[in-house]
Image (tube, rainbow, N blue to C red):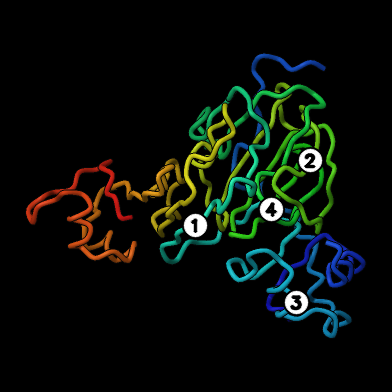
Amino acid sequence: MFGKAIFRAGSLTWLLAIGAGAFAQADTTSIGGADNNEAYLGEGEGALADDPALADVWTEEDSIARIPAYLAYRDWDTDDIFKRTAIEDTVDLQISRSDHDHYMPVCGRITSPFGPRHGHNHYGTDLKVEVGDPIYCAFPGMVRISRYHKDFGNVVVVRHTNGLETLYGHMSKRLVEVGDVVQAGTELGLGGSTGRSTGSHLHFETRYRGVPIDPLTVFDHETGTLQASNLVLTPENNKRPVASASASTSKAGRKVWKVRSGDTLYGISKRTGVSVSSLRKLNGMGSRSALSVGQRVRYK
């Protein structure tokens, strides 16, 4: 029913509204976030899509038309913060198309980076803010989560039109609700230190189908500018967090592939749609040229 969409912890009123078009001083540590993947799962409060009364109200076509990136997820879960699914094929994820479709949530000093921390994985970056500082939405999309969480405090998760999802945690106040349509630069809440937090900061995450991506891959946290307009995600990313971009676009419009272990020119050709001979010509390679890990191969 409803294209297997999952509408958790919501209300019939909210569902019908979408159909109608409604869419202290910080200490110097300032870190927080979850210690394990279980913290991202909800309490299983049930699915409105199981209610027979909604059968004539919502269809799969409604889901596709009104829910951002519905086809990438096939659900709209307002209970689980993140439930990692899988990247089954290589995805060339377009992050930006213009100068006005992205906005750094807050520019500031990183107090805790993405990656291992105290024996656990930290799936976002912690950014220094003061209590009451405005926290902005990174890209256009729709609010999927807006609630209080024991680890993340006042937390908001937004699903964006390209399938990327962003999380904003530890805020002192939330200014949006589930189902709200937001734009890049929409004020989502105010900085704070709620939940499991040692000082006022923003915990910021970027994910695709639940797979964590280092936010530094997407934004320069000091200047607020994009690091790349495209990210290439592969099934390999299901096994480990994405810590760097595999593809990026320079200011001159050139696209490059960052070589990883096991990459070949033939494989890069298949993933980029550029012939091997064109790749060799673009990069001045001979027929016996070898690739090295970390090398950047231009394909446009």
Which label sits on residue 13?
none
- Horizontal side of 24 relative to 293 (left or right) equals right
From the viewer's perspective, tell me whether residue 177 is left or right of residue 253: right
Q: Quadrant of residue 172?
A: top right
Q: Nearer the viewer, mark 3 or mark 2?
A: 2
Q: Are marks 1 and 3 in contact (CB under 8 Å)?
A: no
Q: Which numbered tag is attached to residue 140? A: 4
Vertical placement of residue 192 versus 158, above or below: above
Q: Where's residue 256, x and y in %?
A: 34, 49
From mark 4 to mark 2, how far is it between C-alphas? 12 Å
Classed neighbour count for the residue bearing mark 1: other residues with Cα under 10 Å, few (<14), some (14–19), many (≥20): some
The image quarter containing residue 219 is: top right
Q: Which of the numbered marks, if any, corresponds to residue 93?
A: 1
Provide the secondary structure element on which disc 2 rests. strand
Q: How packed is label 4: few (under 14 Cα within 10 Å), some, or many (20 or more)?
A: many
The local crowd at label 2, few if under 14, some if 14 to 19, many if 20 or more residues have their Cα within 10 Å, is some
Look at the numbered discs 4 and 3 and tell me whether their residues touch, using CB distance below 8 Å: no
Assign a secondary structure to mark 4: loop
Q: Position of residue 3 (x, y in %)?
A: 68, 78
- Residue shown at 57%/26% (left/top)? 222
Q: On residue 62, which mark appears? A: 3
Q: Which one is in front, 76 or 38?
A: 76
Please identify the quadrant where the N terminus is shown. bottom right
Please give the name of the residue rendered at 58% of the width and 25% of the height, measured from the top-left corner. 110
> How much space separates mark 1 and mark 2, taking CA atoms?
25 Å
Q: Are marks 3 and 2 in contact (CB under 8 Å)?
A: no
Secondary element at tag 3: helix
Quick one: label 3, few (<14), some, or many (20+) residues within 10 Å? some
Is label 1 in a helix, a strand or a loop? Answer: strand
